[in-house]
Amino acid sequence: MSSSIIRTVVGDISADEARRPLTHEHLIFSREDTPGAADALRRLRARMDRDMATLAATGCNLLTDVSPIGYLRWGDLFRRVYGRTGIRVVAATGGYAERYLPAWFARLSADRMAERLTREVEEGIAGQGMRAGILKAASGYRTPEGPGERLFHAVVAAHRRTGAPITCHSFPGLAAHAAFFRAQRLDPEKVALGHVEANAWPDVRAAARAGWMLCFTNLGSERVVPDDVAQGQIVALLRRGHLRQILLSSDFRYRIRGGVVRAVWPHRRYDHVFTGFAPRLRALGVSARDLEVILEENPRRFLAFRARV
Ligand SMILES: [Zn+2]
């Protein structure tokens, strides 16, 4: 295996082909047993076409959908995005926080979970005609518990077998996740701790010093932290020399409630990273060169599969 492929739902590409990749988004974030999902998907298509055309116009050609097992992962929708706009989607395998794991998955041993994740990366996601290109772990508590702890071990085992990068929902668990991966002696460039902005600043600094990739999310939303708070954190991290660890992704998503598709927040879309957030960083004094590293080089390096040795 090459050391520099990114696995998308329309095939593996050389990491050099990825332009301004987004590393933490969801086209739709709803459980796979959501009533009315197929109809909702049909109604979402035109809106998604417009969103993705707007995103493609910013120069982005790759988007990572981090919805894991138990959530809608629609091969047809992901391939449609590519067909219409040339944006390749990277699909995820793994799990969300403990209480959101499907019952059948939560019952599995860590070894069985790892087999499932490995299969979804190497062979494909059943019925969807696509392979996963990223592994997701999450915990709802500071420290992963029960099936959550098994999920973390499974993600590490699947990473070792496949070389796929790891993305984490690390709020409120940033410090515990960093400690867990450190004990596993993983390459910090292949692990993105996510929702960094919502954690305590001493935890953010410690994770930065340990070298982990730090994914800032919920951009364009006031729901978790306002953009200017995340921007302040990023400027402070740049001053401390952590340029090559910063990832930006809006974590924008649609969801289905009562058969109706809603945007998770009304006025922002997937292009906000490039049209709103990054220009503001530039105005705060971040150089054009540093922004290129953050928007282009960091996500490309992170998403590339690790060479198996
Ligand atoms: Zn998310």
Image (cartoon, rainbow, N blue to C red):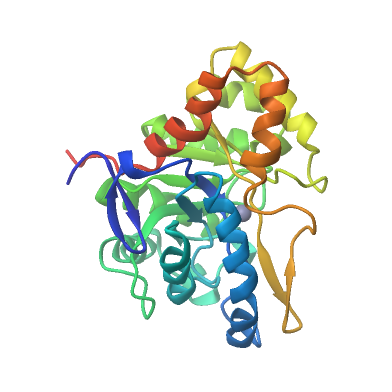
In x, y percent, where is residue 115?
A: 31, 63
- Residue 214 or residue 83, whichever sits in front: 83
Q: On the rendered structure, is 247 left or right of 90?
A: right
- Residue 150 or residue 83, whichever sits in front: 83
Up the image or down, 257 lies above or below 139; here it is below
In x, y percent, where is residue 165?
A: 38, 45
What is the quadrant of residue 42 in the picture?
A: bottom right
Question: Residue at image x 42%, y 69%?
Answer: 79
Q: On the rendered structure, is 157 left or right of 280?
A: left
In x, y percent, where is residue 133?
A: 37, 55
Up the image or down, 69 lies above or below 283; here it is below
* Residue most extreme to the front: 57
- Residue 38 or residue 167, whichever sits in front: 38
Ligand 1 image-quadrant field: bottom right
Up the image or down, 83 lies above or below 163; here it is below
- Which quarter of the rendered picture does the C terminus lie within? top left
Question: Residue at image x 49%, y 73%?
Answer: 77
Residue 51 seen in the figure: yes
What is the quadrant of residue 118 in the picture?
A: bottom left
What is the quadrant of residue 112 in the picture?
A: bottom left
Question: Residue at image x 70%, y 24%?
Answer: 233
Question: Residue at image x 47%, y 23%?
Answer: 244
In x, y percent, where is residue 181?
A: 45, 36
Residue 195 seen in the figure: no
